[in-house]
Image: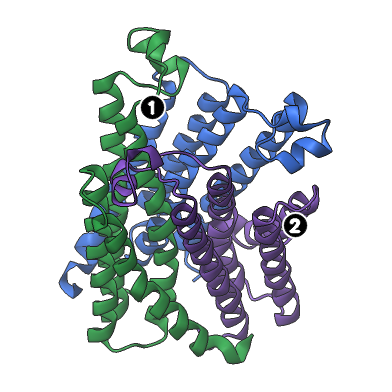
Chain colours: A blue, B green, C purple
């Protein structure tokens, strides 16, 4: 399967997006340490005391960015893999993956830097276009088997 | 792989469930706009002012429905694909996928319309039955390689 | 694909981790019932009245453990499958899967029992090592196709 250019192209962008998600997790952890804002009392105890078991607005922002990634990037890992099996042309498939990839990178940047609305929503919407396109193409490809 | 009836059947129901998740995301966004209840201050500013950076009970309900989907539908995307590789009979496999699919659709409806308990929990439990069945069958199929 | 020892080994540990996630969901539900702490008013009504629509610290802890699993185990289901396609040696691949598996089991135990910090963070970090290693190996394997 990794010999297929379409599938490999999908894997390349998907893996970068997984890495992007890991980076958001690391940022969240660093912000927690720097701002001394922990959700778990055992972490707060280790870093100065129970009073640091508290919420921080920027930590919450990081967590929302991460959750939005779970909602969107994880389904893409499925859709992209299946779509690759429908034998699309490489150029069109790469277009799908690239638009999603760029949309999600801009989404994360817009979230973490609180860019002026509607930057983030626009990035989300742009990234959803190839996803819905893949949903439709997959359903057409397998509808006869259901 | 899309030539395999079992795998195609799995892909069909899975893709519909991904679409269902996308629909919950769209509903959440629409409720936020209609009720003017935003999590991010930049969104609130664009839609009338900082005072609309606030929680709304129905938005929270939509978000819980979505999170529950992440917890259940995403693992199904994995389990169903692997289970399809264990060469089950088409009728039994379709039964697994269909029960899960219907269970999760009822779960979403029960969540969004706040149907009387235990409708939602029952739908969740029904949908988990084929999942646990697939877990067992997969473990039996690969246990010798671990 | 299930005939490949590396892929089967991946499937074995992955499926156990999915089962682990299901167990956390069941624990969360049981704690909700025992402590009478429900998020949805329809559930509270069924179990004694509206006053039981309330938060409980231990329920929140279970939910955080579950969410952390979504953030880490679900991407592993993707990375492990793709990594298996890169034809790694069985011994090295099993090492990757086993370290991740053990790290995530310790993470869940540390979370649910609120073990002294940094047990949980350490388990998280240990489990991320094979993930980042797989990311790198996958990117090397497919970089030429992007």
Q: Is residue A29 left or right of residue A100?
A: right
Instruction: Say which mark, if any, is on residue A121.
Output: 1
Q: Residue at x 83, y 39 (%)?
A: A46
Q: Where is residue B17 shown, x and y percent of the image?
A: 29, 57
Which image quarter: residue C112? Answer: bottom right
Local packing at callout 1 (Cα closer than 10 Å; few below 14, some 14-19, many 20+) is: some
- Are tags 2 and 1 found on a single chain? no
Q: Where is residue B6 shown, x and y percent of the image?
A: 29, 80
Residue placed furthest toward the top = B49
Residue C24 visible to the viewer = yes
Local packing at callout 2 (Cα closer than 10 Å; few below 14, some 14-19, many 20+) is: many
Q: What chain letter is assigned to the residue under label 2? A: C
Q: Residue at x 37, y 39 (%)?
A: B63
In the image, residue B52 above or below residue C18:
above
- Count all numbered tags in the image, as a single digit: 2
Q: Residue at x 29, y 69 (%)?
A: B126
Residue A133 visible to the viewer = no
Which residue has dot 2 on it?
C123
- Identify the element where label 2 is drawn: helix
Q: Where is residue B41 shown, x and y percent of the image?
A: 46, 16
- Identify the element where label 1 is drawn: helix
């Amino acid at each position: 399967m990794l010999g297929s250019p379409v599938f490999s192209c999908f894997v390349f962008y998907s893996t970068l997006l997984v890495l992007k998600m890991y980076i958001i997790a690391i940022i969240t952890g660093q912000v927690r340490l720097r701002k001394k804002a922990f959700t778990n009392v055992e972490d707060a105890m280790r870093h100065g005391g129970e009073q640091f078991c508290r919420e921080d607005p920027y930590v919450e922002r990081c967590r929302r960015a991460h959750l939005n990634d779970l909602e969107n990037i994880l389904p893409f890992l499925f859709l992209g893999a299946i779509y690759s099996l429908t034998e699309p042309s490489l150029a069109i498939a790469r277009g799908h993956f690239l638009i999603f990839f760029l949309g999600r990178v801009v989404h994360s940047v817009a979230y973490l830097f609180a860019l002026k609305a509607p930057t983030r929503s626009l990035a989300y919407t742009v990234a959803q276009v190839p996803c819905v396109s893949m949903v439709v193409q997959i359903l057409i490809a397998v509808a006869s088997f259901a």
